[in-house]
Image (tube, helix red, strand yellow):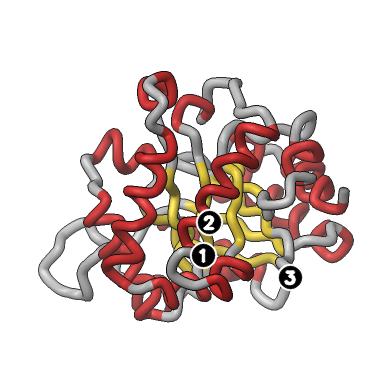
């Protein structure tokens, strides 16, 4: 049985004072939520996340990681640096990184590899744009993005990884895929991994990451191949995030 996982992606938001209130509330509520909970915070707040969440049931991680080891790479953050801050997770291949910063499938694969080598669990984000969905190439896009990583690291690496399906057209737009649309792509992802290893596919947690809200979380999480969520804006509001987490009990 795959344990449900809900991860908050704070994106480039936060302040020390607001973070303290939010993290404390999540930490206090986590034992009763019935799922695994984590937050991926901006790099400057990793020390605060460790300080507040250390010893609790809530994990934390980064929103990015360098594909390079330590070296002359100004502005980058290496995986072994993240380990020193207790990071359990690192998001790689997020659609905003792909669209705004030119990250390719190959770069996402190398970042995935760097996280794995350091003992950090990568959360690999894959998904199609609105144009790609309208063209009917969702399956081709998602499998291409996934297979690029499998080809680089091997399917066994996914036994210690998470995949997040994020339809780009539903991120920050207020739109969301219907539960049936999301389930269809999640099942496709699991089948793609199963083509290389049925055992790894059966244990792989696949999160949905497209405008999950308190009002739609329960229906989404009830789908057989949706194992939780990667939550953007709603993760910045404690009660919304906690309601979404609690929806995994359905």
Residue under label 1: 194
Residue under label 2: 191
Residue under label 3: 57
Quadrant where the N terminus lies?
bottom right
Q: Are marks 2 and 1 in contact (CB under 8 Å)?
A: yes
User: Relative to 146, is 172 on the left or the right?
Assistant: right
Front residue of 72/125: it is 125
**Residue visible at 45% across and 74% down?**
120
Q: SS for tag 1?
A: helix
Q: CA distance from mark 3 to mark 2?
A: 31 Å
Few, some or many residues within 10 Å of mark 1 (<14, 14–19, 20+): some
Residue 40 x, y percent position in the rendering: 53, 55
Q: SS for tag 2?
A: helix
Residue 67 x, y percent position in the rendering: 24, 65
Q: Nearer the viewer, mark 3 or mark 2?
A: 2
Residue 172 - label: none
Q: Quadrant of residue 182?
A: top right
């Amino acid at each position: 049985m795959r344990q449900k996982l809900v991860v908050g992606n704070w994106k480039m938001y936060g302040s020390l004072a607001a973070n303290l209130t939010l993290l404390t509330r999540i930490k206090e509520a986590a034992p009763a939520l019935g799922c695994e909970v984590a937050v991926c915070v901006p790099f400057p707040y990793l020390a605060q996340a460790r300080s507040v969440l250390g010893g609790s049931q809530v994990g934390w991680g980064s929103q990015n990681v360098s594909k390079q080891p330590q070296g002359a790479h100004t502005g980058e953050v290496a995986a072994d640096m993240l380990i020193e801050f207790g990071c359990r997770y690192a998001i790689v291949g997020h659609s905003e990184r792909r669209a705004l910063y030119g990250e390719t499938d190959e770069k996402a694969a190398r970042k995935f590899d760097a996280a794995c080598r350091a003992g950090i669990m990568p959360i690999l984000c894959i998904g199609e744009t609105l144009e790609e969905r309208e063209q009917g190439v969702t399956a081709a896009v998602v499998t291409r993005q996934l297979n690029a990583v499998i080809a680089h690291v091997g399917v066994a690496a996914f036994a210690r990884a998470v995949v997040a399906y994020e339809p780009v057209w539903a991120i920050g737009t207020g739109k969301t895929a219907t539960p049936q649309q999301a389930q269809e792509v999640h099942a496709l992802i699991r089948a793609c991994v199963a083509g290389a290893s049925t055992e790894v596919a059966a244990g792989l947690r696949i999160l949905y990451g497209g405008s999950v809200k308190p009002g739609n979380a329960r229906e989404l999480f009830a789908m057989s191949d949706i194992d939780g969520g990667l939550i953007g804006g709603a993760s910045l509001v404690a009660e919304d995030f906690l309601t979404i987490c609690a929806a995994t009990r359905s």
